[in-house]
């Protein structure tokens, strides 16, 4: 819907109603747009990010009656009651089986009648009207994948990647401490296979937003992972003479340094821990390392041009069954120009925007 943060939204249902509790205190300028199968909310108030403008959008599982549905703005929340057009049990509230992280099941809501916004000591136990409902919700989570399982998976994935890059970094550091510059020639032979494995594994980060495991889109992860794998598999792995160059050592050190901060940051975020220094490093370390990494990648491509001209590797010439040609050397030159000029600017500008947003959010969080 927008780039605005979303408040926590807790939902419950009976056979004829769905109730939403928007966890937004002192709500002002609330704008609720209710359609037959969707609801949108935007308004100012106090929630997880302090006083801010919040919004959310839900594509509903089934139709609701816009005429009889209603909402109340209270001091501590916004209460919304949606009247179902057909009295039936919904297996979930959203039209899709994926749910956003801010959408929660309101188990406590079942202790009182959703039609009456009464105090808890005056409430009746509606759970008696729905025997076994709580156990059913706990077991099935209303048709959703359990958020806890998703979180555990993401923590394990990030932990595996962190261990992989830590292993590479330690091995390279020990070899350099022991053998000095002579160790650089054997860098790819020593850690190349490990690097290829974890780089291929990074394509899971392209899949995560597609399946709703992480926020954002898959375009930027795909560009970053594919660009790095192009250098690793096509420029380095395919040309043995490049594998012994010192630039490989520097590039692997830079890539590892970036990831040794990025993955711990993701792990602590999943565990709801805020480590100020780690956050600052995550969104500041790229300032020196990204330009150095791009420089190393450019050197590798430039040094490979005469090798690929000599071997015609990956070049397709006529005649062939596809009736097409492909000049790999020309592609490398074009890639080099795009990498150094618009590619570097685009990536650095996106990281700058993200850094400004993330560090500013943390500052406002402390103030509130």
Image (cartoon, helix red, strand yellow):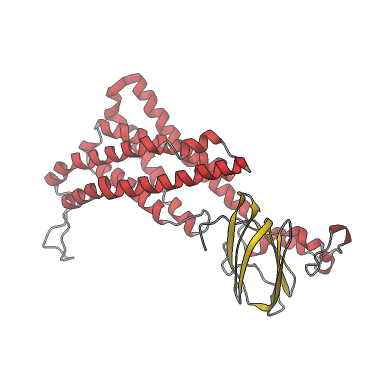
Left or right of residue 2, residue 367 in this image:
right
> From the viewer's perspective, is residue 19 above or below residue 251?
below
Left or right of residue 258, residue 365 in this image:
right
Q: Residue furthest right?
A: 122
Question: Where in the figure is residue 181, as x and y percent of width and height?
Answer: 28, 23
Q: Nearer the viewer, residue 237 or 228?
A: 228
Q: Is residue 255 visible?
A: no
Q: Tell me the quarter of the picture where residue 300 sits.
A: top left
Residue plotted at (15% across, 66% down): 323
Left or right of residue 231, residue 105 in this image:
right
The C terminus: image quadrant: top right
Question: Where in the figure is residue 110, as x and y percent of width and height?
Answer: 78, 63
Q: Is residue 75 visible?
A: yes
Question: Where in the figure is residue 48, as x and y percent of width and height?
Answer: 63, 49
> From the viewer's perspective, is residue 187 above or below residue 267?
above
Q: Nearer the viewer, residue 144 or 53?
A: 53
Q: Tell me the quarter of the picture where residue 303 sits.
A: top left
> From the viewer's perspective, is residue 83 above or below residue 253?
below
Residue plotted at (82% across, 66% down): 126
Question: Where in the figure is residue 217, as x and y percent of width and height?
Answer: 45, 57
Q: Nearer the viewer, residue 44 or 138?
A: 44
Count the marks: 0
Q: Residue furthest front?
A: 29
Left or right of residue 299, residue 34 in this image:
right
Q: Nearer the viewer, residue 324 or 281?
A: 281
């Amino acid at each position: 819907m927008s780039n605005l943060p979303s408040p926590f939204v807790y939902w419950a249902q009976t056979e004829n109603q769905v109730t939403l509790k928007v966890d937004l205190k002192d709500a002002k300028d609330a704008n609720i747009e209710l359609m037959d199968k969707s609801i949108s909310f935007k308004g100012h108030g106090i929630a997880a990010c302090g006083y801010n403008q919040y919004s959310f959008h839900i594509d509903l599982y089934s139709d609701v009656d816009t005429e009889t549905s209603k909402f109340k703005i209270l001091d501590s929340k916004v209460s919304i009651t949606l009247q179902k057009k057909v009295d039936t049990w919904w297996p979930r509230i959203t039209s899709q089986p994926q749910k956003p992280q801010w959408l929660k099941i309101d188990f406590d809501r079942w202790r009182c009648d959703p039609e009456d916004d009464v105090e808890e000591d005056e409430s009746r136990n509606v759970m008696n009207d729905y025997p076994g409902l709580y156990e059913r919700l706990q077991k099935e989570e209303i048709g959703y994948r359990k958020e806890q399982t998703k979180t555990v998976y993401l923590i394990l994935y990030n932990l595996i990647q962190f261990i992989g890059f830590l292993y590479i970094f330690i091995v390279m550091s020990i070899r350099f401490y022991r053998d000095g510059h002579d160790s650089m020639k054997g860098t790819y032979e020593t850690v190349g296979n490990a690097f290829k494995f974890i780089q291929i594994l990074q394509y899971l980060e392209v899949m995560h937003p597609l399946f709703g495991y992480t926020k954002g889109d898959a375009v930027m992860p795909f560009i970053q992972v594919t660009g790095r794998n192009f250098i690793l598999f096509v420029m380095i792995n395919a040309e043995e003479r490049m594998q012994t160059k010192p630039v490989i050592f520097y590039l692997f050190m830079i890539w590892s340094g970036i990831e040794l901060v990025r993955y711990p940051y993701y792990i602590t975020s999943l565990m709801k821990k805020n480590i100020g220094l780690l956050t600052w490093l995550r969104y500041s370390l790229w300032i020196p390392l990204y330009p150095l990494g791009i420089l190393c990648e450019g050197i590798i491509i430039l040094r490979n041009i005469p090798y690929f001209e000599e071997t015609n590797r990956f070049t397709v010439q006529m005649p062939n069954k596809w009736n097409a040609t492909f000049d790999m050397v020309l592609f490398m030159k074009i890639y080099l120009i795009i990498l150094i000029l618009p590619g570097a600017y685009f990536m650095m500008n996106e990281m700058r925007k993200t850094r400004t947003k993330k560090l500013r959010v943390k500052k406002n969080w402390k103030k509130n």
